[in-house]
Image (tube, rainbow, N blue to C red):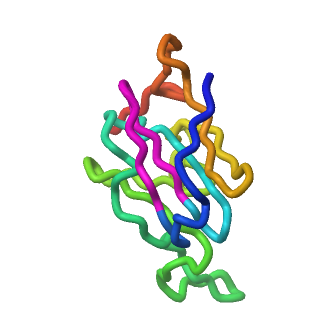
Amino acid sequence: MRDVDIGAASDFGDPDRKLIGFDRFEVAVFKLSDEFFAYLNHCPHMGGPACQGKIIAKVEEDLAEDCTSRGMTFSKTKLHVVCPWHGFEFDIRTGVHPGNPKARLRKIQVRVIDGSVVITVPSHEEHLPLMQEADISVS
């Protein structure tokens, strides 16, 4: 494994995303509420560029006290990234698909060191498995 400095934390907006290309893969680094999250840019569904999709608020059902629905609303705290190939959504904070916890993005270690954002990626000779969980199929 090797550490790669991808730039100053202050260069990120909030929320923001940056894609970093390597020889055999890409990593997406997200900033949300002063926290950083990084994932392999590879959708577990069919290998699409999941992290390049739209960033949207999670859709949630608004329930009354008696548990009846008041309709759907956008979350004020949770953001998803949507794979542009087939619409699979992933929680940016966890990398997990909201309806299928087996569908998840592969996490990449990210941290801020002396004001710089540093990710840990495989060395050139190391194999990078694309799936964290079993392949996901859709019926």
Q: Is residue 94 left or right of residue 22?
A: right
In percent of the image, x 64 and y 45: which residue is there?
110
In percent of the image, x 55 and y 77: which residue is there?
75
Instruction: Please state the horizontal and vertical placement of residue 39, each as a whole percent of the image.
Output: 52, 43
The count of marks equals 0
In percent of the image, x 43 and y 27: which residue is there?
135
Q: Is residue 79 left or right of residue 139?
A: right
- Outermost residue toward the top in this view: 125
Quarter containing the C terminus: top left
Q: Is residue 43 visible?
A: no
Instruction: Please state the horizontal and vertical placement of residue 16, each as a whole percent of the image.
Output: 49, 66
Q: Is residue 61 visible?
A: yes
**For the magenta stretch, what is the residue range?**
17-30
Instruction: Please state the horizontal and vertical placement of residue 133, each as a whole percent of the image.
Output: 54, 28
Write down the quadrant of residue 56 in the picture: bottom left
Write down the quadrant of residue 55 in the picture: bottom left
In percent of the image, x 65 and y 71: which residue is there?
33
Q: Name above or below for residue 76 compared with residue 26.
A: below
Q: Name above or below for residue 46 compared with residue 1.
A: below
The secondary structure that most of the magenta stretch takes on is: strand
Between 62 and 45, which is closer to the camera in this rendering? Answer: 45
Q: Is residue 106 left or right of residue 85?
A: right
Instruction: Please state the horizontal and vertical placement of residue 35, each as a whole percent of the image.
Output: 67, 61
Quarter containing the N terminus: top right
Q: Name above or below for residue 30 compared with residue 105.
A: below
Between 27 and 81, which is closer to the camera in this rendering? Answer: 27
Q: Is residue 2 magenta?
A: no
